[in-house]
Image (tube, helix red, strand yellow):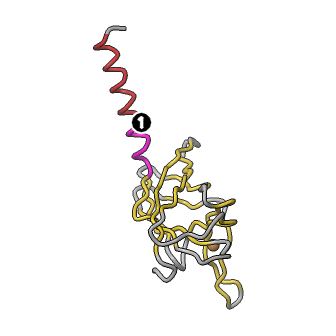
Amino acid sequence: MNRLNRAIVLGTLALAAQIACAQTTARDAWVRGTVAQQQATGAFMQLTSAQGGKLVSVQSPVAGMAEVHEMAMEGNVMKMRAIPGLDLPAGMTVELKPGGYHVMLMDLKKPLKEGDTVPLTLVVEGKDGKRQKIEVKAPVKALTAN
Ligand SMILES: [Cu+2]
């Protein structure tokens, strides 16, 4: 392969990677800070999937386990519970926020202080069953942030 062909191939690969990454985007991610001994906290963000998909799992090195949660009434009490996936309708922004959908970071390895950055890996499954990983760096906000 000559140099020009190689440049074209590399350029095409880079473009393909960008298109794959643009399918679902995460914006304004943040994580609520914790106090010592606290085992769990929430991560919040806005997700937009161009073609539609489903957030099926989350991983973070700061947490032993991460789940996608929803808030739901159980009797008269608002409780959170894990859901197997969060639907991301095509072209719509789905907001994960306090009091609503959130990523639950559990089994925290250490307290999260304001100013820290928490890496999150989101796994989004497209309509075609293909999975996309989205790397997010979420700043930690104060415990009382909304
Ligand atoms: Cu939760």
Q: Position of residue 25 (x, y in %)?
A: 42, 54
Q: Is residue 138 above or below residue 21?
A: below
Q: Is residue 98 left or right of residue 75?
A: left
Residue at (55, 42) in percent of width and height: 128
> 115 or 23, which is in the foreground?
115
Q: Residues in magenta?
A: 18-24
Residue 39 lies in the magenta stretch: no
Q: Is mark 1 within 8 Å of ligand 1?
A: no
Residue positioned most to the left: 4
User: At numbered mark 1, what does the secondary structure look like: helix, strand or loop?
Assistant: helix
Q: Is residue 84 above or below residue 11?
A: below
Residue positioned most to the bottom: 76
Ligand 1 lies in quarter: bottom right
Check the picture and name the quadrant holding the C terminus: bottom left
Residue indicated by mark 1: 17
Quarter of the image for residue 39 reads bottom right
Q: Is residue 41 left or right of residue 27?
A: right
Quarter of the image for residue 58 reads bottom right
Quarter of the image for residue 72 reads bottom right
> Is residue 122 among what the camera can see?
yes
Q: Is residue 34 above or below residue 48?
A: below
* Amino acid on which disc 1 is placed: Ala
Check the picture and name the quadrant holding the N terminus: top left
Residue at (49, 73) in percent of width and height: 97
Residue 23 lies in the magenta stretch: yes
Residue at (47, 55) in percent of width and height: 136
> 13 or 128, which is in the foreground?
13
Residue at (28, 14) in percent of width and height: 4
Q: State whether the magenta stretch is mostly helix, strand or loop.
A: helix
